[in-house]
Amino acid sequence: MKDIYSDAGSDYMQLTKSWHVEDSPWKASNIWEILKKNNISPKSVVEVGCGLGEILYSLNDYMKDDSIRFDGYDIATDAIEIASKKQRDNVKFYCEDFTAVETQPHDVLLMIDVFEHVPDYIGFIEKCNDRATYKIFHIPLELHMLGLLRNQLVEARKGIGHLHYFSKETALATLEDTGLEIIDYTYTHNPKKNKRTRRKIADVPRRMMFPVIPNLTVKLLGGYSLMVLAK
């Protein structure tokens, strides 16, 4: 699976067209909110699987503090080449396997929509756990009734390289199994991502049901991810 991401002109770039860069400001806003909610003011942030780097650039804009160091790591040559073109004094990118390099510990480690792509996802998380005090994960919740009926798991596997699929419960259990302590979590939903007609239609009952029965809505209709803060 590594060649999907690491080859120059990677298959992943071809599959996604944009490396999901259009969602990066929205993801950064959710990261910023969970940090503020838990009174965490990091001086150094590292993102594992940073793609084109737009989450770190957006997070730097939210924090408005050029003394904070942002480091992004990815094995995808084409992604890092693009990310580095806008590099700033406090925002740097590295085309390296983060688990295989020696780095100084960071205050916060980001793993945003990443470990569902990794064959040994538990081992991967464990290798990253001692690299930062706090960890923030964003995990797509693809184990839901509507997704199973529509065969969306196979679509995610073939279309964007997902190898593992999670519900809220299995996502949290996975992180705890690696030795992490869950501090906070919240559902996230990006309405701008729903461009196809069937997704827009499914969003109508989601908006009606979620405020009243959020857990059941996610289990039945999907369309949500989980943002998790751990230590």
Image: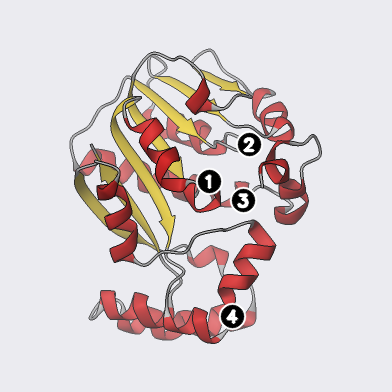
Kindly identify which residue carries mark 2.
52
SS class, disc 1 = helix
Drawn side of residue 141 relative to residue 6, left or right: left
Q: Which residue is mark 1?
A: 24
Q: CA distance from mark 3 to mark 2?
A: 9 Å
Residue marked by disc 4: 151
Which badge, 3 or 2, is on the more N-terminal residue?
3
Mark 4 or 3, nearer chain start = 3
SS assignment at label 2 = loop
Foreground disc of the pair 4, 2: 4
Q: Nearest the camera: 176 or 152?
A: 176
Q: Amino acid at mark 2?
A: Leu
The reply to whether the C-beta atoms of the residues labelled 2 and 1 are less than 8 Å apart is: yes
Q: Are marks 4 and 1 in contact (CB under 8 Å)?
A: no
Q: Is residue 133 above or below residue 194?
A: above
Q: CA distance from mark 4 to mark 1?
A: 27 Å
Residue 39 position (above or below residue 178): above
Asked if the residue under mark 3 is in contact with the one under mark 1, i.e. CB atoms within 8 Å, the reply is yes
Q: Quadrant of residue 126?
A: top left
Work out how far the residue at label 4 is from the one at label 2, CA to CA, in angstroms.
29 Å
Residue at the spot x=30%, y=48% of the render? 175
Task: Please tell me how crowded label 2 is: few (under 14), some (14-19), or many (20+) other residues with Cα within 10 Å.
Answer: many
Q: Which residue is mark 3?
A: 20
Q: Amino acid at mark 3?
A: His
Going from N to C along the chain, the mark reached first, 4 or 2, is: 2
Earlier residue among tags 2 and 1: 1
